[in-house]
Image (spheres, rainbow, N blue to C red):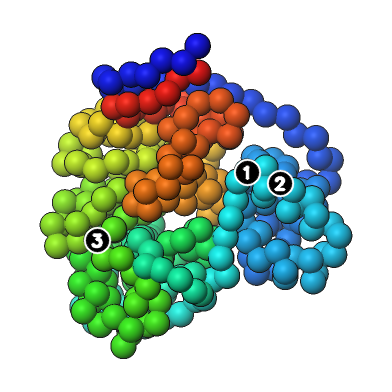
């Protein structure tokens, strides 16, 4: 039976498992090795541990050049997950005035087409890009321009000030445009997202209310603070084994304090604070979330906010997966 609801919908504590039919996991100490451009993990492992692996292998020509027919399994897995992607270009340019220090700014963007929404990544306490360059390429391949200030670590940088660098990179990038990077000419400046991890996630709600950027959606991964100010759709990601400053109970309170009528809380069973970096867990859903909320993709919205096979809450093993939106289809 299908019911269409006009009042806020809450799907609480959805706990879903999934089969793993692949013995050759190519797993080293629990870390997945599927990042582009090396295309590792082709074939069997492409649809392994968390059903997300194939998504990262967006350069199928390179995959086949390295792994041959083994990439057929990767391709099938991608098709079953409704994955489409474009070739990606990576570049860098300088931005003066970052409060967290440094000037280097990395950018990943689809090599053709546009305009695309822009997503600004705010790093954790270790600074830099958190070692996620190839992950950003995967995100960008779906039709997003991803920009990351390569700035300093804690304590010179902190969640109290890092949001200022989001404003700095946005305003400088918009004014400089293609003079700074060809990728900036592909940006739709009316569609901005903020993606924060750890310390960067703490500052993300504050970044979201800096009016000059017109932020339309945010992702708070493994941390958040001051969520009462949020007025845009938000995806909160955590894991049951995250024992840093925002364990699941803290992030859940942040989720509850967020008054926006479109929000998601995803608590991965067994998930650790470092999983976004070491395993890339939930990266496909970061892309789909921004594709929905910024790109206006009805397919992504159905995947993110839907229920049943192919939806966010069915994609992994969660201790809790909660969706809130004003109008939804429940099967």
Q: Looking at the image, is mark 3 or mark 2 earlier in the sequence?
A: 2
Residue 56: tell me if it is visible. yes
Distance in Å between CA atoms under marks 3 and 2: 34 Å
Q: Residue at x 56, y 25 (%)?
A: 308
Q: Is residue 53 left or right of residue 185?
A: right
Residue reaching furthest to the bottom: 179
Is residue 130 shown above or below 288? below
Front-lying residue, 93 or 161: 93
Residue 329 is drawn in which quadrant?
A: top left
Q: Is residue 199 left or right of residue 205?
A: right
- Local packing at callout 1 (Cα closer than 10 Å; few below 14, some 14-19, many 20+) is some
Residue reaching furthest to the left: 211
Res 81 label: 1
Q: Residue at x 25, y 31 (%)?
A: 261
Q: Secondary structure at mark 2?
A: helix
The picture places residue 255, in percent across and down from the top left corner, at 30, 32
Residue 298 is drawn in which quadrant?
A: top left
- Check if mark 2's residue and mark 1's residue have beta carbons within 8 Å: yes
Front-lying residue, 214 or 163: 214
Is residue 234 shown above or below 28? above
Distance in Å between CA atoms under marks 1 and 3: 29 Å
Res 77 label: 2
Q: Residue at x 79, y 58 (%)?
A: 71
The picture places residue 124, in percent across and down from the top left corner, at 38, 57
Res 141 label: none
Q: Is residue 61 left or right of residue 11?
A: right
**Residue receiving disc 3:** 190
Distance in Å between CA atoms under marks 2 and 1: 6 Å
Residue 127: tell me if it is visible. no
Q: Secondary structure at mark 1?
A: loop
The picture places residue 230, in percent across and down from the top left corner, at 20, 42
């Amino acid at each position: 039976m299908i019911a269409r609801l006009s009042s806020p919908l809450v799907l609480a504590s959805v706990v879903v498992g999934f089969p793993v039919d692949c013995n050759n996991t190519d797993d080293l100490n629990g870390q997945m090795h599927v990042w582009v451009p090396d295309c590792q993990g082709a074939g069997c492992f492409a649809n392994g541990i968390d059903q997300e692996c194939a998504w990262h292998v967006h350069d199928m020509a390179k995959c086949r050049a390295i792994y041959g027919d083994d990439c057929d399994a990767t391709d099938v897995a991608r098709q079953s997950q409704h994955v489409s992607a474009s070739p990606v270009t990576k570049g860098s340019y300088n931005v003066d005035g970052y409060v967290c220090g440094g000037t280097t700014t990395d950018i990943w963007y689809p090599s053709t087409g546009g305009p695309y929404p822009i997503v600004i990544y705010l790093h954790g306490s270790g600074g830099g890009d958190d070692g996620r360059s190839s992950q950003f390429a995967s995100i960008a391949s779906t039709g997003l321009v991803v920009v990351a200030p390569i700035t300093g670590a804690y304590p010179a940088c902190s969640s109290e000030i890092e949001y200022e660098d989001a404003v700095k990179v946005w305003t400088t990038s918009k004014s400089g445009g293609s003079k700074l990077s060809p990728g900036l000419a592909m940006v739709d400046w009316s569609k901005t997202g903020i993606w924060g991890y750890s310390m960067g996630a703490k500052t993300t709600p504050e970044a979201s209310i800096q009016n000059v950027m017109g932020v339309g959606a945010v992702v708070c991964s493994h941390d958040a603070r001051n969520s009462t100010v949020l007025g845009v759709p938000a995806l909160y990601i955590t894991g049951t084994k995250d024992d840093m400053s925002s364990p699941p109970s803290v992030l859940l309170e942040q989720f509850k304090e967020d008054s926006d009528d479109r929000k998601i809380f995803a608590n991965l069973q067994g998930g650790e604070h470092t999983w976004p970096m070491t395993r890339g867990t939930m990266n496909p859903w970061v892309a789909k979330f921004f594709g929905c909320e910024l790109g206006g993709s009805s397919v992504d919205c159905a995947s993110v906010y839907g229920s049943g096979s192919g939806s966010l809450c069915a994609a992994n093993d969660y201790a809790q997966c909660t969706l809130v939106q004003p109008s939804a289809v429940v099967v």
